[in-house]
Image: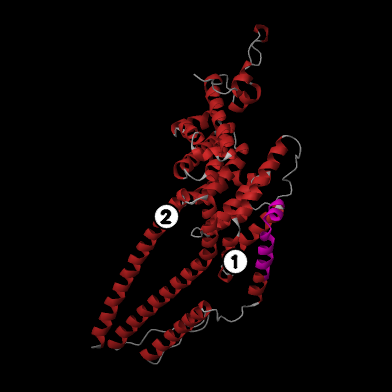
Amino acid sequence: DSFCSAQEDLEREGELDAEDEEESDEDDGDVDDLEYLTLDLVNVLPPEAWKSLLQVLRSREGKALDTNRKNQELRQEVSTLRKKLATASTADALGMPPPRIDTAPGAPCREPASLDAFATAERADLERRVAALAAERRGMAQAGDALDEDLREAARETLAFFHDADVAAAELPRLLATLAQWLLWATKSEIAPSGAAGLLAQVPEELLLRAHSLALDKAEEARAGLHPAAFSDLPDCSPHALAALEALPESGQAQRVGLACLALGSFASENRNSLLEDGGRGLRSALAAAAKRPHHPEVQAWTLAMLAACAPDFPLDAQGAAHVWEGVGVVAGAFRVFRNAPWVLERAAHALAELLKVHPRRGGTAASAKQMRAVLEGVAASPGAAAAPLLRRRVAEALAELDRAAVLSSGCGGGGRSPRDCVGRGVQGNASSGNEGIGSWLCMAPRSSK
């Protein structure tokens, strides 16, 4: 009878494992459905309603991820206990000694007197864990250690800094240092369960957008020679952001904040060099992380902002041309997916213009393959562009760069000159024939209407 009971336990255990696998497949399907639902909401809801919904979702995502992780750990422990009980039942039925119980690491294993002792020891530990989790959910958890207190104090200071978006956005070095610090803490296994990763969900998107807008204004002033050292004091946050993207692939908030940190930090040359060194390993890693969430508007928007900031430093070789080709693919995907999200389309048009400035011929070929001219003209004629002046400006800039790329492809094909040489000097004619400087004019002139 004991042997038959053990066999039944093993069969029931196999059924439970099969149910766990089916539930895992269902969870993957739910994630895909959620991404498509998010895309539908982006295209349907007004911008104000979408921002309000994002605030509610961010406040819940961190708690849901922690609860899901703890539930998964408990399920694994329950499955392990069932296997041990089934093994012990079989051993007891065959007259064999029951398995040893593992104690603390480094301590010798002890032999249980019977199957009841084995089950009691395992169940007591599991019940203690379940009770602790239930108490935490009811708000009855005991006070944490000194590290948790320090973390809560740091969280209060950070949220107070984020409260005034205008002040925080104007202090870009401090903002980047704060984000990098929390990204670092979120990747530490001994700190993350205390809530470090959960605070990333409370980083306001409006604050990040405001900081990016101010950084763009400063960048234009720097190019005009007004503030040449505008971003010299930005910290090098790229290593921490890239580490968070790799360590937390399932956390949408970690991906959002990490890519935003990379985009904002890329206004400084040191951060751009960190992304582009070793053949652009950091840039490829960030693009690969963003590719896993093609329907997440904020993730894709910050990816495009990072591309636009890094494009001026792309090398004029095959590696740089490969970056441009891949970047144009990201831009085309954004225009295809986020048709009714003006802020994403504005980032995409800006990134396309910057990519075309660096490698006009390679970028122009990629844009032609993706039919980007027709897409941009369609966006410019849409009702949404009429209410978004910045989107109209970025689309016009991208169309002008496409025109310039077409001229360069037809007029700068020989002589061994690089596209950037043609942009700077133009195709010089014979001064005596009165054609001096015509190439410079052609490179910048828009396409004539038919």
Residue type, label 1: Ala
Give coordinates of residue 36: x percent, y percent.
41, 53
Secondary structure beneath dot 1 equals helix
What residue is rendered at 56% in x and 25% in y?
Answer: 404
How many marks are shown on the rendered structure?
2
Give coordinates of residue 54: x percent, y percent.
53, 57
Which residue is label 1 attached to? 196
Which residue is label 2 attached to? 37
Give coordinates of residue 153: x percent, y percent.
68, 70
Is residue 94 among what the camera can see? no
Q: Was residue 158 drawn as part of the magenta stretch in this picture? A: yes
Mark closer to the chain start, 2 or 1: 2
Q: How far apart, in angstroms, are the residues tagged by discs 2 and 1?
A: 28 Å
Write down the region rendered in magenta: 153-170
Q: Counting other residues with Cα less than 10 Å from the Cα at mark 1, is it few (<14), some (14-19), or many (20 or more)?
A: many
Give coordinates of residue 41: x percent, y percent.
45, 53
What residue is rendered at 67% in x and 7% in y?
Answer: 432
Marks 2, 1: nearer the viewer: 2
Is 428 displayed left or right of 343 in the figure?
right
